[in-house]
Image (cartoon, grey):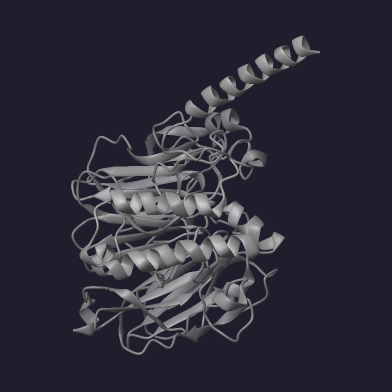
Amino acid sequence: MKKSLKIFAAVLAVFCALASCEDSSLPSDSPSSAETTVSNVSSEETSSEETSSQTPSEASPESSNASSEASSESSVTSSESTDDDSSEEDMYSLVRLENEVTPSELPSIKEMLYATHSNFLLTDDGKLYSYGFNGLGGLGQKFYNKDKNNPFWEQWTGLPHLMDIDEKVEHIYGATREYTFAALTESGKLYGWGNNRYGIIPSEDNVVTTPTLIRFDQKIKEAGISQMFLIVLAEDGNAYYCGWMGLGSKYAYGEIDEYPDICRQDSYMDFRKIEVPGGESVQSVFCSQNYCGVLTESGKVYLLGQFPKYKSPTPKPKDAEGFYLFEVRSPEPIVQVAPGSVWLILLSESGKLYYTGEWGYMAGGEAEDYSSKLIELNFLDDVVEIKGSTLAILARTKDGSIYFWGDNNTYENGRIIPGMDKIVNQPQKLPVPEKAGKMFLGCYNVFVFGQSGDIWGFGLGYGNRFLTRSADQLKPYPQSDDVQTPYKMPIYARPDYPDYFL
């Protein structure tokens, strides 16, 4: 009996030693278990705050006390929460980074991009910040994943984080319901990150977690990007395209880890010049989930991609395989294009709007309606600017008013137009308390820059989108803050107005 006990004790000692070695092999900055609890996250945040550079307000005793209270509150909430609450907490992990900033530390804002989960702020000094959820590397940040083999696990950061791009950024691009983004620098270089299943970012990885230089032999003036398409306007006045070539369409919208080899085989990973009829110079380029296109100097619009409902008068070349370039013929020159997922709205030089495509509510009808040709919309007069997302559209009129219509959000507490249904099929004037200078349309949000420099926000506040929470108020999982719209953001925009406001 004693001999058996000695053997059992020896086996147990070996087992414990192996377990200890396995634990010590984990990275020092990673959780010790895949089942990270709320209290573990809170302690990691406290450690991160202590080692990072602090502003005077963050270093103050009041701030430290507030942080401790928030951590304590989180732990109590975790122990007393219901099963549903626990599952939500386990689903998300709050990541705190040393180079996060509070809104008051930001210079004035130049551009904003709010996609499904990823949010971006471009400041006047050329710095690009991201915050929100890091699904598919959408934030361009190297987060530690709870499951190292699963790049889709939702980790998030609640405060803007400076992105790692060496020079000043001029513009930020991305389709609002996707996870692929690009930044254009002042020297004309383009950096991309996020979902890379179609290989448009020069990397073997399907998920690119840091801004990566896109190789192009000219200075880039403008760009458009989505999961399947990348289009650039070069300094020579021509547009160049890479991405999906239109083959194997049944694989186009599968999960990112499905058919990766097929997707890349069906994609041009080198740039090809778009041969505009007559050799006309390109004025601007644009991109949607399903297509990309160009607007020429004379006001003509050409599309390349999948636009199934539109009956193009441009005949398909007999030798064309996959996509071919076709013209969307309008009765007058076009000055701006608002691309949607399966629809298109054009702004003419006389201020008229034209529509074609599916999702008829964009033209005042029902969701199942569509137009097989270009039709004129009689919604508004004197339109001077339009912007489209996958789901909705914004229009600004000459008097500085902003109108919204389209998908009004699934979440009632995040409706852009409160008190209205999910679908708004007629333009609704946004109650901005001052004349508007700029407007930005995201997946679930609208932001308007007022003439005073204030930024007014509308829509869903989930994940600290409106920056309502400071560092010591963030919890380990995202909160959905109810805000009154228009909501005055705690950041500032330098007034920048078109000529017709002067």
Q: Give 433 or 27, whichever is nearer the viewer.
A: 27
Q: Is residue 6 left or right of residue 164?
A: right
Q: Give 184 or 59, whichever is nearer the viewer.
A: 59
Residue 472 position (above or below residue 427): above
Residue 126 visible in the shown view: yes
Residue 398: x and y, percent?
32, 85
Q: Is residue 407 left or right of residue 122?
A: right
Q: Is residue 415 left or right of residue 191?
A: right
Quadrant where the image shows the N terminus: top right
Q: Is residue 177 left or right of residue 457?
A: right
Residue 399: x and y, percent?
32, 88
Q: Residue at point 28% right, 64% down?
A: 58
Q: Give 139 or 472, whichever is nearer the viewer.
A: 472
Residue 353 position (above or below residue 161): below
Which residue is farthest top? 3
Which residue is farthest right? 1
Quadrant where the image shows the C terminus: bottom left
Image quarter of residue 491: bottom left
Total residue callouts: 0
Residue 198: x and y, percent?
50, 37
Image quarter of residue 468: bottom left
Residue 350 visible in the shown view: no
Image quarter of residue 242: top left
Residue 283: x and y, percent?
30, 57
Residue 310 position (above or below residue 16): below
